[in-house]
Image (cartoon, rainbow, N blue to C red):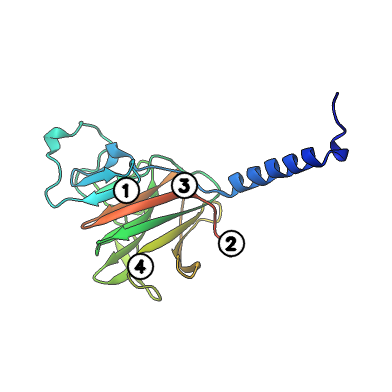
Amino acid sequence: MALPFARSPCLCRWGAKRLGAAAAEARRGVSFKLEEKTAHSSLALFKDDTGVKYGMVGLEPTQLALNVERFREWAVVLADTAVTSGRHYWEVTVKRSQQFRVGVADVDISRDSCIGVDARSWVFTYAQRKWHTMLANEKAPIEGIGHPEKVGLLLEYEAQKLSLVDVSRVAVVHTLQTDFQGPVVPAFALWDGELLTHSGLEVPKGL
């Protein structure tokens, strides 16, 4: 015998939990790993393909599977999941790196290029103890953030925005106006140290 839904506290609580779980799932951003087949030979993935570390020598190109997806000239790696809509938030832990780039790129960005160099990637770059935005090889300085242990990125696809977030203050430091024309993927480049990604996160309140 079915119980009248409105008269069943247990079912009401169960339904509320299901709705709450569904709402939380909807608020979560893209969940991704790093795509090994795109990683330059100087980069090695770790922690179940969520982290990347730089090696001065790197792997011998002859030891890598030959494929057209791999970056050939620059120390770049892309995520394995593309974004075509919605608001998404992920974080990056920075370990012993003084020169790196984080952002997004077209899924078909040239593998002979570097993120930030062409017009199909949107990047925040850290080098020489300073932050800059970078698009089509042009830089603009960013103030108000030092060398953090962790940064956040907020991607708003329909609004055509990518923001750098100060995780310690849960505040947007700078926003890039983008020009997305198709699917984009989280993108990373580094020339020392390690980067560890944290994805599938909810957009923090207030952002």
Task: Rate crowding at label 4 as few (under 14), some (14 to 19) or many (20 or more) other CA atoms within 10 Å.
Answer: few
- In front of the other: 165 or 13: 13
Question: Is residue 63 left or right of 90 when viewed as pictured?
Answer: left
Please tell me how crowded label 1 is: few (under 14), some (14-19), or many (20+) other residues with Cα within 10 Å. some
Q: Mark 4 belongs to which amino acid? A: Pro
State the image quarter where residue 94 is shown: bottom left
**CB-based contact (under 8 Å), mark 3 and mark 4:** no
For label 3, the residue is: 181
User: Dot 3, how many residues are within 10 Å of its Cα: few (below 14), some (14-19), or many (20+)?
Assistant: few
Asked if marks 1 and 2 touch (Cβ < 8 Å), the reply is: no
Check if mark 1's residue and mark 3's residue have beta carbons within 8 Å: no
Residue type beneath disc 3: Gln
| Amino acid type, residue under disc 1 in the picture | Gly
C-alpha gap between disc 2 and disc 4: 21 Å
For the residues labelled 1 and 4, the Cα–Cα distance comes to 17 Å
Question: Of discs 3 and 4, which sits in the foreground?
Answer: 4
> Callout 2 environment at 10 Å: few (<14), some (14 to 19), or many (20+)?
few
Q: Are marks 2 and 3 in contact (CB under 8 Å)?
A: no
Query: At x 24% / y 65%, what residue is drawn?
Result: 98
Quick one: label 1 or label 4, which is nearer the N terminus?
1
Q: Is residue 57 left or right of residue 14?
A: left
Q: Earlier in the sequence, mark 2 or mark 4?
A: 4
Q: Residue at x 45, y 65 (%)?
A: 167
Give the alpha-carbon distance from disc 1 to disc 3, as whole Å: 28 Å
Q: Secondary structure at mark 1?
A: strand
Q: CA distance from mark 3 to mark 4?
A: 31 Å
From the top left corner, tell me how far across and down residue 91 is, in percent.
42, 56
Q: Which residue is mark 4?
A: 148
> Going by the image, does 41 lie left or right of 186?
left
Name the residue type under label 2: Lys
The residue that mark 2 highlights is 205
Task: Kindly identify which residue carries mark 1.
Answer: 51
